Image (spheres, rainbow, N blue to C red):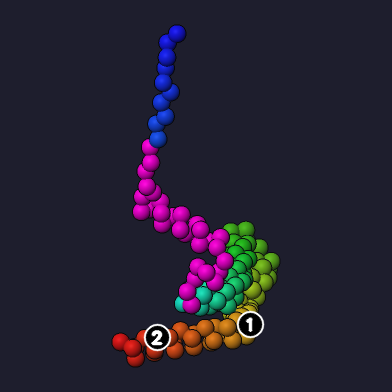
Amino acid sequence: MKETKDKFAYQYSAPTERERKTAEEIRARYAPEEETTDKLSQLQRLDKKASQPPMIVALSFGVVGILIFGTGLTMILEWTLLLYGCLVALLGLLPVGFAYPVYRKLAARGRKKYGAQILKLSEEILKESEENDENS
């Protein structure tokens, strides 16, 4: 009987810097918020929550309005439907005209909702930076 020795090969390689960074970014998304973020990134995230939704809604109003307005112009210039084209173009100007007032109203609501948290957090950041400046 022939005797064979089973061989076990093991190869270890440490993750590259890029792999390590990617793993840390993915881990940060799933870790609890307080552990992974500093105060400045929390402040930036709150500011984004307050200002981004109004901008998205206002831009949507504007884009839809411009598309409707363009359809009205097409009706006038290409299809020679003057009366209906004018009505559709005027109808398209309504959402464009309401985009900015809607933005202001939603932005005010966002500032009211997140304003206290943003002010508190920014105050803490400013106090810490003043303390660091005094200690330097």
Name of the residue lying farthest toward the top: 1
Residue 35 in magenta stretch = yes
| Depicted 132 relative to depicted 36: above or below | below
* Secondary structure that dominates the magenta span: helix
| Cα separation between marks 1 and 2 | 26 Å
Depth check: 9 or 4 in front?
4
Q: Name the residue under label 1.
A: 113
- Residue 55 shown left or right of residue 10 in the figure: right
Identify the residue at horizontal 50%, vertical 57% (top origin): 26
The amino acid type, in three-letter code, at marker 2 is Ser
Q: Can residue 38 be seen in this view?
A: yes
Q: Nearer the viewer, residue 25 or 109?
A: 25
Instruction: Tell me where the magenta segment starts and ends, as one range.
Output: 11-39
| 135 part of magenta stretch | no
Quadrant for the C terminus in the image: bottom left
State left or right for residue 69 relative to residue 19.
right
**Secondary element type, mark 2:** helix
Q: Mark 2 points at which residue?
A: 129
Vertical position of residue 136 compared to residue 5: above or below: below
Query: Which residue is painted at 49% across and 71% down in the image?
Result: 37
The image quarter in which residue 60 lies: bottom right
Name the residue located 36 percent from the left edge and 50 percent from the top edge.
16
Q: In which quarter of the image is residue 82?
A: bottom right
Q: What element carries label 1?
A: helix
Can residue 97 be seen here? no
Q: Position of residue 12 (x, y in %)?
A: 38, 41
Mark 1: give few (<14), some (14-19) or many (20+) Cα within 10 Å: few
